[in-house]
């Protein structure tokens, strides 16, 4: 690889390691896989020094994923040009089902060079905190609804007695009424048993 003014770098970020590949901006340039590095800051600094020795300007991209935006924020604050790409925006060929870190990084670098990728909006820390608060509120509301449903289940006996009286008042056969109520009760108990954990 010779010294050039710019280089596209695709990285695949995991909790334990980061896979890296890079490509020069001119068409037909070979995509080089640089292997994997650790996730510590010193490992990233060493990688960036190595890449800056080959190009003055780096555009680095990685797929948004469970590792969050911490890497993006720490490196953009230091003046690096990083892209976060949504996995759903990455074009995929029909028969390409095997995904390895090496193939993913090479594809990212190649697609960034071709201009086929666009970075997504990375929320600020405050925005992300508000999103987390909203998600926590939604979880709490869901838990509250489940608790209300469990409370309502205590009223099931009252509803069954009311239903029994209504059917008997219509002049239905007593055996048919009991069977109908028993079926409703069995369905109710089955639904409850599916939601409750089994005793150890």
Image: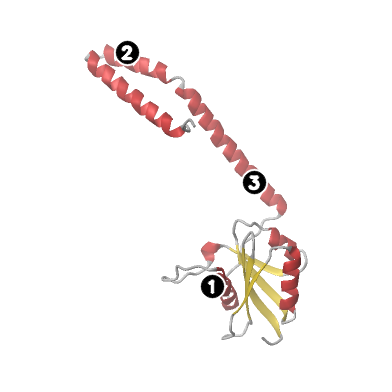
Q: Does 73 appear above or below 193? A: below
Q: Residue at x 69, y 87 (%)?
A: 2
Secondary element under disc 3, as helix, strand or loop, is helix
Vertical position of residue 97 compared to residue 122: above or below: below
* Residue hosting label 1: 103
Q: Quadrant of residue 101?
A: bottom right
Task: Determine the residue positioned at 60% across, 75% down.
Answer: 109
User: Which residue is located at x 67 percent, y 56 percent?
Assistant: 123
Q: What is the x, y in percent for residue 117?
A: 57, 70
From the viewer's side, name the closer residue of 175 and 171. 175
Choose mark 1 or mark 3, whichever is in front: 1
* Quadrant housing residue 18: bottom right
Chain-order first, disc 1 or disc 3: 1
Element type at mark 2: helix
Image point (48%, 33%), residue name: 197
Q: Which label's residue is closer to the chain start, 1 or 2?
A: 1
Decide: few, some or many residues near mark 1? Use Cα within 10 Å; few <14, some 14-19, many ≥20: some
Q: Position of residue 156 (x, y in %)?
A: 42, 21
Q: Secondary structure at mark 1?
A: helix
Q: Which residue is mark 2?
A: 165
Q: Quadrant of residue 192?
A: top left
Q: x%, y% of residue 142? A: 54, 36
- Quote the CA–CA distance across marks 3 and 2: 49 Å
Q: Is residue 178 visible?
A: yes
Ranked by sequence position, the earlier of labels 3 and 2 is: 3
Label at residue 193? none
How far apart marks 1 and 2 lie (CA) works out to 69 Å
Q: Nearer the viewer, mark 1 or mark 2?
A: 1
Q: Circle 3 is placed at which residue position? A: 132
Answer whether residue 172 is visible to the viewer in this image.
Answer: no
């Amino acid at each position: 690889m010779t010294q050039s003014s710019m280089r596209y770098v695709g990285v695949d970020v995991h909790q334990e390691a980061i896979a890296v590949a890079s490509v020069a901006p001119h068409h037909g340039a070979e995509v080089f896989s640089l292997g994997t590095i650790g996730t510590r800051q010193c490992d990233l600094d060493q990688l960036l020094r190595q890449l800056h020795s080959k190009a003055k300007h780096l555009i680095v991209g990685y797929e948004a994923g469970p590792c969050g935006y911490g890497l993006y924020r720490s490196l953009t604050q230091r003046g690096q040009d990083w892209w976060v790409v949504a996995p759903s925006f990455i074009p995929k060929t029909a028969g390409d089902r095997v995904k390895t870190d090496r193939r993913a990084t090479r594809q990212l670098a190649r697609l960034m060079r071709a201009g086929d990728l666009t970075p997504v909006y990375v929320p600020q820390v405050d925005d992300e905190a508000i999103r987390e608060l909203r998600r926590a509120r939604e979880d709490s509301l869901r838990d509250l609804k489940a608790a209300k449903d469990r409370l309502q289940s205590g009223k099931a006996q009252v509803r069954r007695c009311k239903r029994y009286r209504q059917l008997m008042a219509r002049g239905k056969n007593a055996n048919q009424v009991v069977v109908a109520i028993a079926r409703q009760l069995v369905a109710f108990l089955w639904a409850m048993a599916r939601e409750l954990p089994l005793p150890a």
